[in-house]
Amino acid sequence: MGKLTNIKPRLSSVAPRLKSPPKIVEPFYSSPEWRKLVAQIKRQRGAFCQRCGSTDRIIADHIIERKDGGADLDPSNIELLCHAHHQAKTAKARARRARGQTP
Ligand SMILES: [Zn+2]
């Protein structure tokens, strides 16, 4: 009885994807902690952009981005943004980082 014959390789019921996704989504953003916090913030503040009041594709965004050292799950570091404002903010932060600056 040296072999573990009871264990059958049945775990691969989901076919592995060979194509790599075009965008790497950080696992953090699919974590239950994050989702829960976002739902809570939307309930408390209302699901609209905190800058313009739009309700277009509201995204919870870190004011100080995580890669810049911002707190992950601190509501005071999270801002609800519409699609347009989120794009603008992300582009700005990226440009700033490219210049080697941190907020
Ligand atoms: Zn907006």
Image: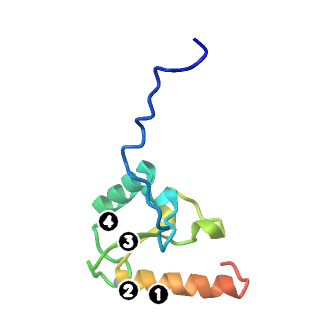
State the image quarter where residue 43 is shown: bottom left
Mark 2 residue's CB less than 8 Å from ligand 1: yes
Q: CA distance from mark 2 to mark 1?
A: 6 Å
What type is the residue that disc 1 sits on? Ala
Task: Specify which label sits upstream in the sequence, 1 or 4.
Answer: 4
Residue at image coords 65%, 78%: 103
Residue at image coords 34%, 55%: 40
- Of circles 4 and 3, the one toward us is 3
Which residue in the structure is indicated by mark 1?
A: 88
How far across and how far down the image is residue 5, in percent? Answer: 49, 20
Residue 84, label in figure = 2
Residue 38 seen in the figure: yes
Which residue in the structure is indicated by mark 3?
A: 59
Task: Specify which label sits upstream in the sequence, 2 or 3.
Answer: 3
CB within 8 Å, label 2 to label 1: yes
- Of circles 4 and 2, the one toward us is 2
Residue 4, label in figure = none
Which residue in the structure is indicated by mark 4?
A: 45
What type is the residue that disc 3 sits on? Ile
Residue at image coords 73%, 83%: 100
Instruction: Give the answer, above or below, for where 27 lies relative to 90.
Output: above
